[in-house]
Amino acid sequence: MKRIILCLAVCMLAGCAGGHITLKEQGSFAAGGTTLVRPGTYDNSKFVGWAEQEETGQSYRADHAYVQYQIPSRARRHALVFVHGYGGSGAVWQTTPDGRDGFATLMLKHRYPVYVMDLPGRGRAGRTTAAKTVKPVADEMFWFDIWRMGIWPRYNEGVQFPQGQEELSQFFRLMTPDLSAGTLDAQAVALTAEKAAPAVLVTHSAGGVPGWMAAMQNPSVRGVAAYEPGGFVFPQDDLPAAIDGLTGGSAPIAVPREQFMKLTQIPLVLYFGDYIPEEPSKNLGDENWRVRLHMARQFVQTVNKNGGDATLVELPKEGVYGNTHFLFVEKNNAHLADMLAGWLHEKNLD
């Protein structure tokens, strides 16, 4: 197979600095999806327009994920499948607001094959069967607060997020509309893991739940590294109480015990950043992640008491400070990548 030399200083992942990566293979594919077929016989003599069509007898493929992959020379055995969160696409794993190596590139440097997903209805996977209207909602200040970058317009003290108007603009321009039906994410993740097998899922925020679901569905998933997951599954006969909060709180997601037990058969690690209080707060972002961190602790406890191997890493307790909800794009993301590589090695997921 043709070998590709990729210079990070000019690579398409953007913002790469120094050194070379030798790739054995790179490309993209669609994972999952549906196909609509209209009844009747297609008549190619009719022209209605470019945007409008006579649909009789025609087909429409949609609801798939778009997956971009890169496999380095001397690749490790396990591939990493990157799953983004709400409002984003796979681009969040591929670049940083200030143009440094993205997290997928950093893990590629550790010689892991990387598979970066745009979930159905997001980014380059925008062709869906859902009928949605896209509205230009001004919401960036809200997300600045929710993602614990600070309280607009002030950044949190000591924050690792790259500050500056251009950096903030680049960050918010990574956001993309969600045009999905919201039901096919887990299937797409599971199918991507099967294609990349054996695979470790690397999830973020709202990508956490489809990650848990995919890991329970597909034995190709050999581990999960979840960065501030937004939701958690529990066996339906052992549910913790929901936790109230200003942004709707956090409630357990019930699954059959037999299904949950599959999570106890693979190593799991959860990473949470800074600026998360222990006590209730009047700040939306603080409160949103306070309740989710408390639920994460219960999730890890439940996995482990059932014989599993789950680790919760609260970065400030490890002496790592200043990280927001988007910790993997921040100034210390290389250190966080080294931490992940260390965990993967410890769990024999090289």
Image (cartoon, grey):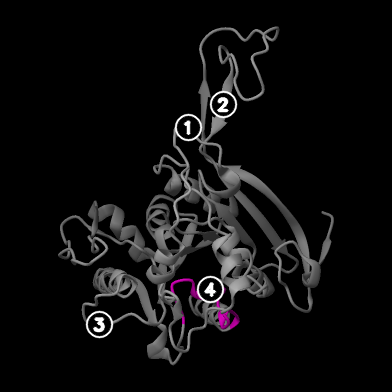
- Identify the residue under disc 3: 278
Amino acid bearing label 4: Phe
Magenta stretch: residue 324 in it?
A: yes
Q: CA distance from mark 3 to mark 2?
A: 49 Å
Question: Of label 2 and label 1, which has the lower sequence position?
Answer: 2
Vertical position of residue 198 compared to residue 329: above or below:
above
User: Residue 80 appears in which quarter of the rendering?
Assistant: bottom right
The residue depicted at 35 percent of the width and 63 percent of the height is 230
Q: Nearer the viewer, mark 3 or mark 2?
A: 3
Q: Which residue is mark 4?
A: 328
Residue stretch rendered in magenta on the structure: 323-334
Q: Is residue 159 magenta?
A: no
Say whether disc 3 or disc 2 marks the residue closer to the N-terminus. 2
Location of mark 2 (residue): 60
As drawn, the label of residue 195 is none
Tell whether label 3 touches label 1 (CB within 8 Å).
no
| Label 4 residue SS | helix
- Asked whether disc 2 touches disc 1, contact meaning CB atoms under 8 Å apart, the reply is yes
Nearest to N terminus: mark 4 or mark 1: 1
In the foreground, 144 or 344:
144
Give whichever of 161, 152 is nearer the camera: 152
Q: Amino acid at mark 2?
A: Tyr
